[in-house]
Image: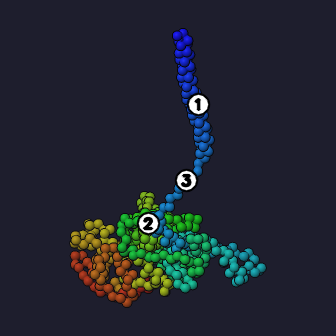
Amino acid sequence: MEQDNKTEKNNQQTSLLKRFGISLAGGILGGGLVLGGAQLLSNDSNSTSTNSTKSQTTQVSNISYDVTSDTTKAVDKVQNAVVSVINLQKQQAMSDPFGGLFGGNSPSNQKEEDNDNLETSSEGSGVIYRKDGDFAYIVTNNHVVSGSDALEILLNDGTTIKGELVGRDSYTDLAVIKISSKDIKTTATFGDSDKIKVGEPAIAIGSPLGTEYASSVTQGIISAKNRSIQNTNDDNEPVNINAIQTDAAINPGNSGGALINAAGQVIGINSVKIASSTSGVSAEGMGFAIPSNDVVNIINQLEKDGKVTRPALGVSMYDLANISSQQRSEILNLTDDVTAGIVIMTVQNATPAEKAGLEKYDVIVDIDGEAIESSSDLQSILYNKKVGDTIKVTYYRGKEKKTTSVKLSIDQSALQQNNTNN
């Protein structure tokens, strides 16, 4: 019985040891797992630390974004057709103190000196609009080429070639240059400027501040249409532009460059900007371009004849809209319903206007059935007429409405010659 009790006690101890052993083993295994996990975490932490050190160096993402928009497409169509125009002029050569004793002023040497003395006088922009056989044609501003002794053209790819002046028109501030077509791959297309809308996108391309910034692109909108820009150029010649106004950035050097629409069509040739008012108030975003429809009319004549022949009325004018209602009533003696037209300020002798009986203070309101609200309207109509044509002019003389026929018998150059003789 005692033996049985000892045996049972031993069995219990063995069982307890087994359970303890299992428990201990489990504890060791669990500890091993915990320790192992700690080791793994430690290794991962070291790895992360190493990667973190490596990732502290800034790198460019390998994800790129190819931006394509109406603007980029429009620019791509015409950018290679926009060039820089370099106006070269002779510099004053120093006189030979030896009177040509050593051949310094011989005709051949003088010619070489003239070529050597050519220096850049100014830089502007231009637009290649046509290729014809061995030649390509560029439109630019008259004031860009004015006074030039030679012209150089800087293409968009950096190539510089010689340019030859075909013709220029100071009145519209336009000129045409001829170049070799050898390296020309892109020409611009003219859009219909009569169909543009105020508020639509407008993109200017050119060389602001010269060739250093060639092919610069700026974007804005069409701010207004039919802005009358009247001025005189450096040669004291009258300039009269029926302009498109835009807030696309235009700076000196942009002159002669392209103003394009969202389709990549040229709708204007950039010509001038207003930096301040006559009172000295500074202005921003007021650039002006010659409408493409007027441009095409002029450059076709310049290519053909080297000049523009346009008929003249022989009057100086002022827009009625700029005259106060009191002056309309007291000076012009108009009725209240006449609010738009052009006022004749002077009539020159022996001109179509005088021969037709037009007088000072007559107010022209209609020509050939088209309403005349500004001098730019009259200009546009005359552009489409030829010397020898007859137009029907409707006007007010005081409160009386009259109509007369005017035969356009002289052109602007003849009118200027008459002024010189007088």
Amino acid found under the numbered disc labelled 3:
Ser
The three-letter amino acid code for the residue at tag 1 is: Gly
Q: Residue 32 carries which label?
A: 1
Q: Nearer the viewer, mark 3 or mark 2?
A: 3
Which tag is nearer the camera, tag 1 or tag 2? Answer: 1
What element does badge 1 sit on?
helix
Residue at the far front: name it. 1
Q: Nearer the viewer, residue 13 or 117?
A: 13
> On the image, which quarter does residue 366 sit in?
bottom left
To which residue does mark 3 refer?
61
Residue at the image point whose x is 60% and y is 47% from the top:
57
Residue 145 placement: quadrant: bottom right
Q: Which amino acid does label 2 sit on?
A: Asp
Return the x and y of residue 128 as percentages of the image width and height: 51, 76
| First of labels 1, 2 by sequence position | 1
Residue at 57% across, 36% down = 41
What label sits on residue 70 in the rendered view? 2
**Residue 319's x, y, as percent?**
33, 72
Q: How far apart are marks 1 and 2 (CA)?
A: 67 Å
